[in-house]
Amino acid sequence: MENIISLKNIVVDFEDGERILKNISLDIKDKEFVTLLGPSGCGKTTTLRIIAGFLDPTEGDVLFEGKRINGVPPHKRNVNTVFQRYALFPHLNVYENIAFGLRVKKLPQKEIVKRVGEMLELVNLKGFEKRSINRLSGGQQQRVAIARALVNHPKVLLLDEPLGALDLKLRKGMQTELRRIQQALELTFVYVTHDQEEALTMSDTVVVMNNGHIQQIGSPTDIYNEPINAFVADFIGESNIINGCMPRDCEVEFTGRRFECVDKGFSPNETVDVVIRPEDVKIIPAEGAKLTGIVESVVFKGVHYEMIVDGVDHKWMIHSTKAEQVGTMVGMTFDPFDIHIMKKTAAEED
Amino acid sequence: MKKKILAAPYLVWMAVFIVVPLIMVAYFALTDNAGKFTIKNISDVGQYANIFVRSIWLSVIATAICLVVAYPVSFLLSRMEKHKQGTMLMIVMLPMWMNFLLRTYAWMTLLGNNGIINHLLGLIGLGPYKLINTSGAVVLGMVYNYLPFMILPLYSVMEKIDKSVLEAASDLGCSSMNVLFKVIVPLSLPGITSGITMVFVPAISTFIISRMLGGGSNLLIGDLIEMQFLGNSYNPNLGAAISLVLMVIILMIMTIMNQFSPDDQVLM
């Protein structure tokens, strides 16, 4: 697979001097579903706007199929965007919205009719051609926006939090739908979201961003199972993050106790972040347990209970299918391979 | 029922000051000075066809100039940062805070044969040119006085155009020109039509501007009407007839304008 888009050492400063992107490099492969994931203000939308051409980087190069495209205006780029709030043309009906790009390119009428028809079918909007876009539901507007972008047969489709305004059920449906479209048309999708579950469900590759830096690039499983630092671990699903240190290989000390673990390669007594997933903490009887705490709260979450256990040095978040009584003393344990040791990152400092 | 009461003050106002006077205008237009029914007044209006043509022509030119000047300014204004928009709008409105007569007098001093402009031109060996008492001066006066009425409605529709809609257009292949004609113009159409109305209607019926800047040779409909009521050729019946014809003409032009407006934005 070849790289269709490469970002090389991208830096973006806004007019007020704020640095939005701090040296970002990213390769996007052809026919890949890439998700830029991060909290708001992390620079993910800015990255997308650079690929679309709405914004030129202060420093760095944008390559499209190996050619530098810095300064090429949006209308000359072979990418199309699905905007956050759809940005449909209010003066045009569904059909004309979708046909817009084709009319601009002055395609023959027959071709326009054919392609718009295909798109209406693809996004299940047959029979809505004449409908004014003000009379569509959010989900329908969303699908018009997707059709309007896809009808131009772009090589890359950029999607900026396209499902953000939809309710949960509709969003789930659209996630599968988008994935289906991406695979059916064999397109490259660059998808921006702050919803980690969405990112894990849909993507081939997830790019986790924070504070204008890329934190980690990897497959959804890699990102979830092997988060590279405490930020990624915390952002991708909830985590217990505790300060600790490594007295030696395969041994970690936190909350004043030493535990066996599987990580090595740290300098002696290096301070580290210790990350343990809430579902990896097992509750055992308090007698004889290495770690104990008092159950502070229990919340039913559907599939599991979420409990907060106050262990004096750390409040543990625990996911379990069995609820404990609030106020009881419980013991906690975890397997050595469920303890993830992470270097303290420089990115957290700025 | 209660809600209707809220409209009562205006309904009374409308009856006393709009409906009754309109009926009176129609009555005067269709009677002679003895109070007998006649259509002579209306048919006499035909004698002044050249004045009607000049009035329409000059107001059309003034309206067109206003549109051409106001459109780009309004667009820039609508894309500025919010706090700058307020300041700029105030500057646009500023001339309107000054008395209309004063503003027009100012132009008389500027354009006069011995006025400031000719004086300055004289210093570099040009002129003097005949600036005042020309139809050009009348158009200038109209543009100067009515430009804000074009800018404001244009600005208020353009300000509502979402930036991402314009980005979407360029994303879908539009050059800047294409974005203008395929998105900005259609979306600002309601502003264009209401701006045209707000400039054209006062321009076609003005008499101060033409009197002060146009001299005797650039009589407009407004002057003609005024003369029938206050001038030597006192004839209120003819004056009322001219007003009635003018109203019909404006009504016709507005109806044509509305054909270009989206259905839900009809002005009249």
Image (cartoon, coloured by chain):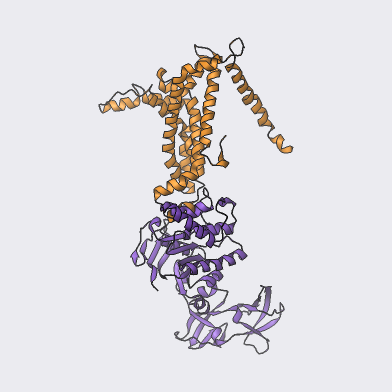
Chain in orange, by letter, is: B
Q: Position of residue A182 (x, y in %)?
A: 49, 67
Residue B150, position as x, y percentages in the image: 48, 36
Would you say A106 lies left or right of B82 here? Answer: left
| The residue positioned farthest toward the top in the image shown | B34
Q: Is residue A325 above or below residue A108?
A: below
Q: Is residue A248 visible?
A: yes
Q: Residue B116 at x, y = what percent?
A: 34, 26
- A177 vs B62: above or below: below
The quarter holding residue B67 reads top left
Q: Quadrant of the N terminus of chain A?
A: bottom left
Q: Which chain gets the purple colouring? A: A
* Residue A253 percent coordinates (x, y): 54, 85
Task: State the image quarter where residue B13 is shown.
Answer: top right
Which residue appears farthest toward the left when viewing the image? B125
Picture layout, residue B160 above or below residue B121: below
Residue at the (67%, 28%) spot, across then down: B12
Could you say which is closer to the camera, residue A346 or residue B242?
B242
